[in-house]
Amino acid sequence: MSLWVDKYRPTSFDGLDFNLESSDVLKRLTSNNDFPHLLFHGPDGAGKETRVRCALRHIYGDGALQLKATQLSYDTPSKKGLTISALDSKFHIEIRPSDVGIHDRIVVQNVIKDTAKQFLSVSDKPFKVVVVHEADRLSFDAQSALRRTMEKHSSRCKIFLVCMHIHKMIEPLVSRCVPIRLSSPSKEELTQLVKNVAQKECFTVTDNFIHSLIETTNYNVRTTLLALEATVDKGGKNYLYDNCRIVLPDWRAAIIDIANRLLDKRRVEDVQAVRSRFYDLINALIPLDIIFEQLSIEMSKKLVSVEEKLILYDSAAKFQHMSISGDKPLLYLEAFVLDVLSKLSKTSN
């Protein structure tokens, strides 16, 4: 039994509900064999992976959606074994090189080289596609190696890069791709999507509940559908009244709790009270940049003035950037919230 987020994920361009202009550009680009490398970028839950799958199906047909999980093994220069999970079909492979940390360069180079050597006897396409997820989390060396390798094998291997933050990628790599910018759906588009799912699952939802749901999930389509299904599973299809409690993933609930604790009274001493919550997030392997981003969003909801929000975002950008070169995420998170609270206290005096 599929989750609703998978069950109702469009598999063709005709089934898409938003970002239609970008999707039309993507469809036209992939209608012939000489399209360039592509860079899908935009916020989390905006439909990047969905459009990657739609493009693959448009290029190769239904076979591109017949995926299987596999393990790839490589050796590091020190002869240490390296294993990474991947998804592949007869026509493409999807990898997340950032999962192996400092060895991401080895994965990037070897996967592209190996894919370019494979002959596609089951298709009239002279190339296979390599999808690189979280490309913005690749190290500088991996991005440089990716740029060189994709140039060398461009005739036999097309690259689809998927990322949230295009500014974290080196310019020589970005310039070799056509960017496909995807934005979060509007309130009206996401409201209609939730209503469509509710109709197909035979229950009703009020507009107030939907508004609360999409505001809580920050217009993230994936999180919205997951939260909708979790809320229905917990309380039943008659549970969705205006003020019912929306069920979120534990890590999202923890971030909301942190934001509420810190800004309810805006006391510096409250930082110590949320330390255990930060530990929980770090131990759950939630990426630090995601924690910074989501915490900033939730804290901004409790700030009224533009001045206060500018203080928040400036501090978040500063400490998130500093954390890239550090190895103690808790220190940067605590320094961030301490900086924000101390500055906010000065503006209120």
Image: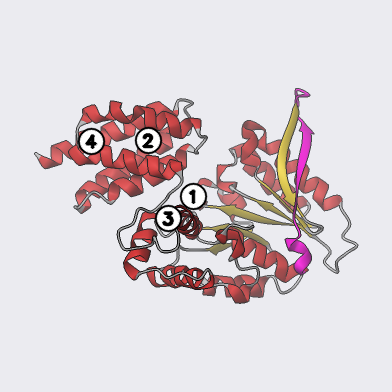
Q: Amino acid at mark 1?
A: His
Residue 341 is tagged as 4
Separation of residues labelled 3 and 2 (CA atoms): 40 Å
Identify the element where label 2 is drawn: helix
The colour style of the image is secondary structure
Q: Residue 335: image x %, image y %?
A: 32, 30
Q: Which residue is mark 1?
A: 167
Q: Earlier in the sequence, mark 3 or mark 4?
A: 3
Tell me: 230 left or right of 138: left
Q: Amino acid at mark 4?
A: Leu
Q: Which residue is mark 3?
A: 235
Between circles 4 and 2, the one closer to the viewer is 4
Identify the element where label 4 is drawn: helix
Q: Is residue 212 above or below residue 18?
A: above
Q: Residue 235: image x %, image y %?
A: 42, 55
Residues drawn in magenta: 61-80
Separation of residues labelled 3 and 1 (CA atoms): 42 Å
Q: Amino acid at mark 3?
A: Gly
